[in-house]
Amino acid sequence: MPERIHQPPDQPSPEPDLTPQPSLIVAEPATVQACQQDYADASDVRLRLGWTDGQS
């Protein structure tokens, strides 16, 4: 039978930071120009998902 090696107990993981963070979605107004920019910036995401413009 193999010899047991004493290991110290696992250290508890640190608590996550649950402090509310500012949201850019709420901080900036939803203008037509902002929405158009978001759409243009996400073209690579749509391509990776196999979407074509005008289709979902």
Image (cartoon, rainbow, N blue to C red):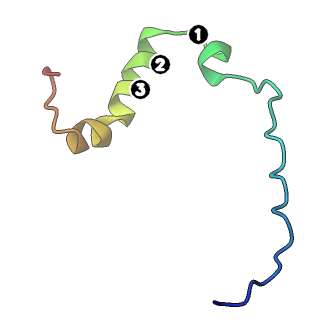
N-term-proximal mark, 3 vs 1: 1
Corner quadrant of residue 21: top right
3 relative position to 45: left or right: right
Mark closer to the chain start, 1 or 2: 1
| Quarter location, residue 18 | top right
Residue type pointed to by label 3: Gln
Mark 1 lies on a secondary structure that is loop
Determine whether the residue tagged by mark 2 lies in a helix, strand or loop.
helix
Q: Nearer the viewer, residue 29 or 52?
A: 52
Distance of mark 3 from mark 1, alpha carbons?
13 Å
Position of the N terminus, as image quadrant, is bottom right
Marks 3 and 2 sit apart, C-alpha to C-alpha, by 5 Å
Q: Position of residue 39 (x, y in %)?
A: 35, 26
Disc 1/disc 2 C-alpha distance (Å): 8 Å
| Residue identifier under label 3 | 37
As rendered, which of 44 and 6 lies closer to the eye? 6
**Labelled pair 3, 2 in contact (Cβ < 8 Å):** yes
Q: Residue at x 86, y 71 (%)?
A: 8
Q: Amino acid at mark 1?
A: Pro
Q: Are marks 1 and 2 in contact (CB under 8 Å)?
A: yes
Q: Residue at x 14, y 20 (%)?
A: 54
Q: As shown in the figure, which amino acid type bears the numbered disc 2?
A: Ala
Viewer-closest of 56 and 29? 56
The secondary element bearing badge 3 is classed as: helix
- Residue 16's place in the image compared with 23, above or below, is below
Question: Residue 3 occupies which quadrant of the picture?
Answer: bottom right
Image quadrant where one finds the C terminus: top left
What mark, if any, has residue 29 been given in the picture? 1
Residue of label 2: 34
Residue 48 vertical position relative to residue 19 in the rendered view, above or below: below
Q: Are marks 3 and 1 in contact (CB under 8 Å)?
A: no
